[in-house]
């Protein structure tokens, strides 16, 4: 892959950065989402024949990173176009593609993603949400619970990860279902979070939710393949989200360090301030390279290579983000905890990149087992 971005990518980055600056930290989510959709940024990764830009994760990650660096990240981008749009584009039926992709591309329709469960956490093999097939109608009946699902109240549907029973073996296998927001038996309750984010978190209860046969996305027997086709983009986009946040915090700290003067020169002249900020910048740049590698591998169709790189990118970006935010707050001192400078809320928000959608410890497990070939402890 090219180390230097193409001119098209540079132009995209500059255009999105300009959009982000116009909206800034006090942005209105609906207004920004609508404008980004009309400009083609939300669907830049989706196929052109369905209204998208014909690009890939490389382009979509640029959009999210630059909006985050401007202080106006759109968290739903991680879910709606990246996970759900990608899964439907790769595995959906022609009817599902025609129904959903144009709206996901221009932002007029959105979709949430429900995988995490109270007793499963990072172990997707313990998912207990089940889908039973009705023999007469050919439809499905879903039962189960999900937690920490973002934006269910503002999306048109949720892509739910459930499990169906294999008629031959009796074992359960993962499958993906599109559940409309107003489906009977589909209940949501908001989780009270300390996190200050526009997109709220919800717990979902599926109580005999009846769905038509065409609610199933893709092949009933290819659930794991389809699931991880969505999880790799999720990791890449989480990295972009974290990098944008880290860059925003670092820019604030650098501006402050250039102008804040306590003795005879700005505080940025002192190595105790300058070196940690330089280190944060280096770590962000290194994480960006890994994110770009992961996006490149995924867009090239190398799912195995993308899996390793996406996990590494998410890990590196999460760590870089937390350290950049921490150092930015420390650089501003008391001002770093005021609303005026907009950094205090990032102390909590930056931890999300370490925790979700998979913890750094589980990534280390993945790398130790898959990359290094070390034995499992579980």
Image: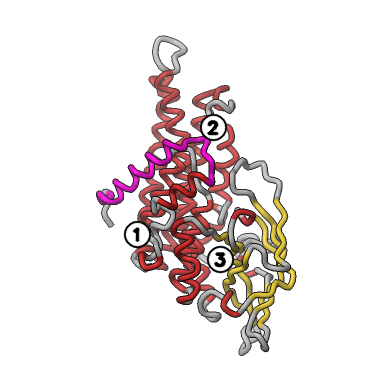
Residue range of the region highlighted in magenta in the rendering: 5-30
Residue 347: x %, y % from top left: 57, 37
Q: Earlier in the sequence, mark 3 or mark 1?
A: 1
Q: What element carries label 1?
A: helix
Q: Is residue 288 visible?
A: yes
Quadrant in which the C terminus appears: bottom right
The residues tagged by marks 1 and 2 sit, at their Cα atoms, a distance apart of 32 Å
Residue at (67, 41) in percent of width and height: 194
Does 20 lie within the magenta span? yes
Whether residue 256 is situated above or below residue 129 in the rendered picture: above
Whole-angstrom CA distance, mark 3 to mark 1, is 29 Å
Where residue 140 sits, quadrant-wise, is: bottom right
The answer to whether 48 appears left or right of 160 in the picture is: left
Which residue shows up at 74% across the image and 69% down it? Answer: 207
Q: Quadrant of residue 186?
A: bottom right
* Mark-to-mark CA distance, 3 and 2: 39 Å
Residue placed at 46% from the left, 42% from the top?
68
Quadrant for the N terminus, please.
bottom left
* Residue 61 shows in this picture: no
Q: Nearer the viewer, mark 3 or mark 2?
A: 2
Answer few, some or many: residues within 10 Å of disc 1's Cα (few below 14, many 20 plus, some between 14 and 19). Answer: many
Check residue 343 in the rendering and tell me which mark sits there, or answer none: 2
Q: Dot 2: what SS?
A: loop
- In the image, which disc is placed on residue 296? 1
CB under 8 Å between discs 3 and 1: no
Q: Residue 56: horizontal and vertical position, in percent? A: 37, 60
Lateral position of residue 115 relative to residue 287, left or right: right
Q: How many residues crowd mark 2 within 10 Å: few (<14), some (14–19), many (20+)?
A: many
């Amino acid at each position: 892959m090219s180390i230097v971005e193409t001119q098209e990518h540079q132009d995209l980055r500059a255009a999105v950065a300009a959009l982000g600056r116009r909206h800034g930290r006090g942005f209105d989510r609906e207004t920004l989402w609508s404008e980004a959709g009309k400009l083609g940024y939300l669907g830049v990764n989706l196929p052109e024949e369905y209204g998208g830009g014909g690009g890939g994760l490389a382009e979509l990650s640029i959009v999210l990173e630059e909006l985050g660096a401007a202080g106006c990240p759109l968290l739903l981008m991680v879910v709606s176009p990246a996970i759900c749009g990608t899964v439907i584009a790769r595995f959906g039926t022609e009817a599902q593609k025609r129904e959903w992709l144009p709206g996901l591309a221009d932002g007029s329709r959105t979709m949430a993603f429900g995988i995490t469960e109270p007793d499963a956490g990072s172990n997707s093999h313990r998912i207990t949400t089940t889908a039973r097939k009705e023999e007469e109608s050919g439809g499905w009946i879903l039962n189960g619970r999900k937690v920490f699902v973002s934006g269910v109240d503002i999306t048109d549907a949720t892509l739910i990860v459930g499990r169906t029973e294999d008629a031959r073996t009796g074992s359960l296998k993962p499958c993906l279902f599109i559940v409309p927001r107003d489906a009977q038996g589909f209940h949501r309750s908001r989780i009270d979070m300390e996190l200050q984010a526009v997109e709220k978190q919800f717990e979902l209860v599926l109580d005999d939710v009846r769905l038509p046969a065409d609610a199933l996305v893709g092949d009933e027997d290819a659930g794991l393949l389809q699931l991880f086709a969505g999880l790799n983009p999720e990791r890449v986009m989480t990295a972009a989200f974290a990098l944008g946040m880290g860059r925003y915090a670092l820019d604030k700290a650098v501006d402050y360090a250039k102008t804040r003067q306590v003795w005879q020169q700005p505080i940025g002249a002192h190595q105790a301030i300058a070196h940690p900020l330089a280190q944060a910048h280096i770590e962000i740049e290194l994480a960006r390279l890994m994110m770009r590698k992961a996006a490149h591998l995924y867009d090239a169709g190398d799912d195995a290579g993308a899996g390793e790189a996406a996990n590494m990118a998410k890990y590196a970006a999460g760590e870089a983000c937390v350290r950049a935010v921490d150092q930015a707050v420390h650089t501003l001192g008391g001002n770093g905890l005021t609303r005026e400078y907009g950094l205090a809320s990032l102390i909590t928000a930056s931890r999300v990149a370490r925790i979700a959608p998979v913890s750094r410890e589980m990534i280390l497990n993945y790398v130790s087992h898959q990359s290094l070939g070390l034995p499992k402890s579980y």
